[in-house]
Image (cartoon, rainbow, N blue to C red):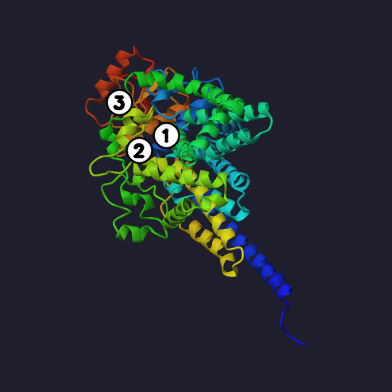
Amino acid sequence: MTNQIPTTDRRHSLQAGDTRSQRIGFAAVVLSVVMLGLYFYRSWLFTGFDGVFGDTGDARILIAILEHWHRWFAGLDPHWSDPIFFYPERGVLGFTDAYFLYALPYSLARAAGIDPFRSFMVVMLLLSLIGTSTFYILARRCLSASALTALLGAALFGFANMMALKIGHAQSYCVMLLPSAVLLSTAAWSSPRKPLGALLAASSGLLLALMFFTAYLTAWFAATLAMLTFVIYAVIGGRPRMVTLSRRLFVERRPVTIGFVTGFALGLVPFLVLYVPVLLRGTARPFDEVQGFFPQLADIINPGADNIVWGRLLKSLGIAGIEGRQLGEVELGYTPLLFATFLATMLALLGGARRKLGVAGDVGLALALAVMLYWLVQLDWFGYRPWHVIWEYVPGAKGVRTTFRSQIVALFASCVVVVIGLELLRHSGASKTWLVWLVPVLALGLLTEQLNRKSPPRFWRSEQIAWLASLPPAPAACRAFYLSPGSGGTKEWWEIQSDAMIVSAVRGLPTLNGNSSWWPKGWQLNDLGDPSYPAKVAEWMRQNKLGPEVCALDLAAATWHPAAP
């Protein structure tokens, strides 16, 4: 008799052990993903839903515009392009992002009786759910990824360190809709039924166009990165692939191509109606202004000085937290482990691993190369930045000031590449017991390094509600208002202007004040402390033939004054 386990039984025993290990690892990753999501929303979920993403400047401008959309859907504001700010200027929605796709769920929440601040947070939560769930589906269906790696990619996409840093500019979170557009496109391309394929493609094109009508920078970065990826994908396949793609696009899949172009063209109509008049008046970002926001080489792994894992180390190395820089715009780098995984995957795909994956491998390589190229053209090369060529010749580029926000869109592509890399690693270790734990351990490391002490930034709903309640009703004869000189106290000018916009939006009372990316011609009411402010108010009223129907609001004293200056 012998106590040795027969070879077949031993193999079964090892496989059973591997299965148990994989289940334990998967459970640990799932728990970590849940914890990451809770941490991302901690200032809202664990404060009685009181915390609101952003600061009292940009975030409240967004909420005021969403409130305008809600009022327009309800028939209370006369025209969709005319929020009641910078009164009586027309078309002022075109001075900033339109937030149309945000406005749909926001208005439903408002119709259900939820206040403006919580309605905004409902939109943010809905975007998280859409982005993570559609990325998971995309990874499973299009990349044949395991549940673990698909879930990891979805979490890295939805709750990344850079997302937490940039959620204060919530228009960036529009990128959560990008996996939906890609899913619709891939479903259209693979559909055997031409009418269904055309319909799905039209839906994808429409969604992308409405992303332009929601958050311009995010949509522009997405469109240009997609085109760059397509070109690289065609080039690495050589002439045969170029011929094949041309035949499929314009012959075999022509209904799909026509459907996408038609949907995109229709969806772009309101965007053009709104922004072409603004463009024709000469609005553009001068290149000197853009240069102040360019990244440096090391910013690709700059997650900010408050990143829990890497912040202190990178600050000591002079990479993160450098005074004098636009930290909110340059600290959008990848966390180092994520970037290392991305680079390792790109090198593996360049080395021939993509042949094992077929189309997915080539797409992954094209995405990786596009992401790298998009970053490299923003850098200074011996005193010259290639982005100048893009700024000069690519349509829409002169509307881009903060080029490194492209990282938010590149994150989507990078997470796809990371999923491909983890799948390659998982399959390469199928026969090695010690590798069973490698992917879960790597996953936990990738998730942990997304934590940031500082972000997301937030302000308090309860304080805003109490402040608004403290303001008495405007005089009955008042049809529009401006802020009294010096009534903002010690607040920054942009916060005071946002005060006016919130009061205007919630009360439905037009205001001469406001803030946005662009200002109306001749409007100079931004500085309430300027001694000439009353004269500038009087001049604005004279230019626009306003009279006794205009009153003044003293924010500090919470009083209204019926007399115009």
Q: Is residue 389 left or right of residue 165?
A: left
Q: Quadrant of residue 430?
A: bottom right
Provide the residue designation for mark 1. 217
Task: Residue 419: give its label.
Answer: none
Q: Amino acid at mark 2?
A: Thr
Q: Amino acid at mark 1?
A: Leu
Relative depth, front residue between 74 and 480: 74
State the image coordinates of residue 34 (x, y, percent, origin top left).
Answer: 57, 54
Q: Residue 294, relative to residue 485: is it above or below?
A: below
Provide the residue designation for mark 3. 525
Residue visible at 37% across and 29% down in the picture: 394
Q: Is residue 247 left or right of residue 527?
A: right
Whether label 2 touches label 1, CB < 8 Å: yes
Residue visible at 43% across and 50% down in the picture: 455
Sequence order check: which comes first, mark 2 or mark 3? 2
Task: Residue 402: give its label.
Answer: 2
Whether label 1 touches label 3, CB < 8 Å: no
Q: In this orientation, does residue 517 appear?
A: no
> What SS does tag 2 mark?
loop
Looking at the rendered image, the quarter that the N terminus falls into is bottom right
Q: Nearer the viewer, mark 2 or mark 3?
A: 2
Q: Residue 100, relative to residue 325: is it above or below?
A: above
Label 3 neighbour load within 10 Å: few <14, some 14-19, many 20+:
many
Residue visible at 30% across and 18% down in the picture: 540
State the image coordinates of residue 105 (x, y, percent, origin top left).
Answer: 57, 33
Q: CA distance from mark 1 to mark 3?
A: 27 Å
